[in-house]
Image (cartoon, coloured by chain):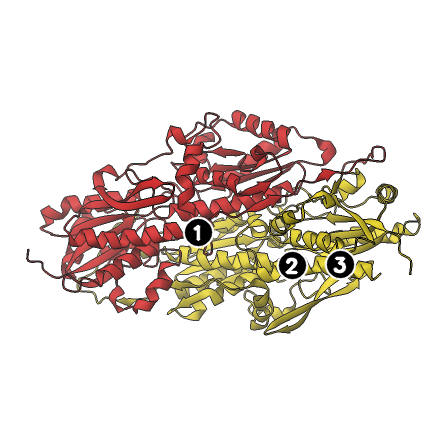
Chain colours: A yellow, B red
Amino acid sequence: MPFQKANALVIQSGGPTAVINQTLAGIVTAAAEHPNRIGQVFGAHHGLHGLLYENLLDLSSLPTRNWQAIAHSPGAALGSARLKPLKTDLSRVFEVLEAHSIKYLFYVGGNDSAEAAQLIREHAESFKSDVRILHMPKTIDNDLMVTDHCPGYGSVARVVTHLVAGDDLDNRSFYNGIKINVCMGRHAGWIAAASSLAKLCRESDENPDDAAPHLIYLPETKFSEQRFLDDVQRVYDRIGRVTLVVAEGLADQIQNKRFEGEVDEFGNPQLSGSGKLGDHLCDLVAKNLSVDHSLGKIRVRADTWGYLQRSLTGLISQVDAREAYQVGRAGVRHMMEGETDQMLTIRRLQTDPYQAETGLCDLAEVAQKTKVVPPEFIAEDGHSMTEKFMEYALPLVGELPHVHALKAERVAKRLGEHFRPHS
Amino acid sequence: MPFQKANALVIQSGGPTAVINQTLAGIVTAAAEHPNRIGQVFGAHHGLHGLLYENLLDLSSLPTRNWQAIAHSPGAALGSARLKPLKTDLSRVFEVLEAHSIKYLFYVGGNDSAEAAQLIREHAESFKSDVRILHMPKTIDNDLMVTDHCPGYGSVARVVTHLVAGDDLDNRSFYNGIKINVCMGRHAGWIAAASSLAKLCRESDENPDDAAPHLIYLPETKFSEQRFLDDVQRVYDRIGRVTLVVAEGLADQIQNKRFEGEVDEFGNPQLSGSGKLGDHLCDLVAKNLSVDHSLGKIRVRADTWGYLQRSLTGLISQVDAREAYQVGRAGVRHMMEGETDQMLTIRRLQTDPYQAETGLCDLAEVAQKTKVVPPEFIAEDGHSMTEKFMEYALPLVGELPHVHALKAERVAKRLGEHFRPHS
């Protein structure tokens, strides 16, 4: 089969992850192993924007030694974008691809990007283009269909596990501490769910049920402010504090979405980068919770973790990094074998010990669809995760931290009670 | 010199740090080496509250092997409090100390705690108490007088360095990204200042001046919203994005402190656990910044890092952990040598290679005082740190992460311009 040598283009699209550049590095290094088939490797500067405006970067010009450093850096190294191709954009897309002899298009993104990739693929024939497209999964949201999980998820899961493990010990330092943590996750609660792994980090003489997160709220479960307050009250009454996690997507269920900011071209409202949901829940708890005031005032705090969840260097999951790299390399292999116009997937072969391989699926199975957390991963109480979920998520996160909550015997009292005016 | 055997009490006070339990572990393990002088070691359950209400924990009952695990766990393992002793509390304090034969009081805290310790010391004689007090410094704020730095600071400095190093690459992923990060620091900007170390994490072909943080705002510098906007505009015009850090204490300088929450017994208003300052600055920038709209809309986001700064396990500075432990051990040594009623300090012997030892200072030099970031650490522009500061802070943080911002050559354009309607 005669094969014409052509150039390749990599597009990074949508929200970055901590390992998105592993996939990029995987593509670039694997492409270099096919010098007779792949000419130059270009990168679109800022996603579809770079493609439309012909802002292309020459990745072949970078020294090989740079790729390892780039691979382990968070953020989209090529620049990303949240553009959806308009009808009027399509002719331009093929014009640019043609002008730069690009036949191999690697689109690294989530379900919105899969939609964009599918649109380009569908119109290729009518524009007489022989471009071949592979979509490489990338999203901290872990909400792509078919694939067992998405590169990027293991690292954010690792970050939130560390956050909750430490945060609960911080919250436990004070009496009457109610700590609300708002994590990313618009339509799916995979990130909030991952915080449940913090329970496994706790070496303690305490009751294992006392380890945080005590309550987890996912967009998959109908949210009621009254039930939320009842849950918080019940945990407080039992252990004197509450450390909980809510997915930012809950904002959609509260008071007519009044927390939303701007909307992108795919119709997604901005939820991150604002503390409004956390502040609202804080007020709600502060006004309604009944606490033991002899211990001092109620202490309600909210943290909105924001972008650090996907960009924190130093806590990247090694499993996640390796898989993201392998997805990039596998993409080049499939492209060379002519298996294109699909999305790369990760197929779990077994969980313990963890083994996985890459696969392929049709773009139509992924585009515009969202894989929510399935019922078997959500406990019946609606605010905790099942063991089955934890078995699923654990191998993606890597080694867990270990923290220890001191629990010592009380010294017998020798005096009468003390009374102190409370301010 | 005949010495009566007596018990010891450890109090953890104020906001926890990631290494406050190192100091506790240092005290407990060193105390065990003086079985003829120190009987039992107690912990006050929740700071002064535990002392007043006679809620004491028997730390001698814990297996030795637990202490290493407790030492590396964030949060105040004994429980903390933000109580100030009232006049009516003082007799009770000495009553409880007497009832439990406590002669050695180790008070682990910041400047508010030093004030409490000083108050107890001043009244000891009039209550016929022979209690001896040592104050052990602990604060992420790094704002205690005399000591070169405070245990707890190195770890928060390490966290914010990682946060900014990753966050700027995340922000750089998009066009027109303005990213505001609100860090802890009420009266002193030491934490915001530490984020400047992120500049050293950047391996890049970019201009070194392009590495974040691009702007740092400390409470030490007078804040003007107009100058802030001018600064942001100038950086944006130069490199097309801005990643900046503001200390939460700036809220005091903006519009009549309208961001404040509740106030503790020392008169400190709550600043953390709310996203209000970040949201305010976000709105300010979104409404006033002039950006290149051909690249897309302005993207302004604020993250308020909150409590994770002091509780994030996995990014603890090893230098900080070691020093916090040594401070605990040195405290016991000084106590046994009769050098008491003082605060432990860290004295820097040299910076490169870093060497330090513990020392002592009078409590009155520390109590109620705040060491702000000195002028020689703040650059003339008022929004960046001097090299001298970075030399000071670097050895406290430990090994820095390395991230790489991709910079590749542009591919020559072959087509005319593209015009696209902007939504």
In terms of secondary structure, where does tag 1 sit?
strand
- Asked whether A95 or A204 is in front, the reply is A95
Q: Earlier in the sequence, mark 2 or mark 3?
A: 2
Mark pair 2, 3: CA separation: 26 Å
| Residue to which mark 3 is pinned | A331
Q: Residue at x 38, y 43 (%)?
A: B353
- Residue B131 versus residue A337 in the image, above or below: above
Provide the chain ID for the residue under circle 2.
Answer: A
Choose between B386 and A140: the one closer to the eye: B386
Which percent across, then down, holds residue A250? 60, 54
Please tell me whether mark 2 sits on a helix, a strand or a loop. Answer: loop
Q: Which mark is residue A188?
A: 2
Bin the neighbour count of mark 2 within 10 Å (Cα to Cα): few under 14, some 14-19, many 20 and up: many
Q: Residue A35 has which mark?
A: none
Q: Amino acid at mark 1?
A: Val
In percent of width and height, residue B103 lies at 15, 56
- Name which residue lies at 33% across and 40% down: B350
Q: Is residue A238 left or right of residue A246?
A: left
Quadrant location of the N terminus of chain A in the rendered image: bottom right
Mark sitting on residue A300: 1
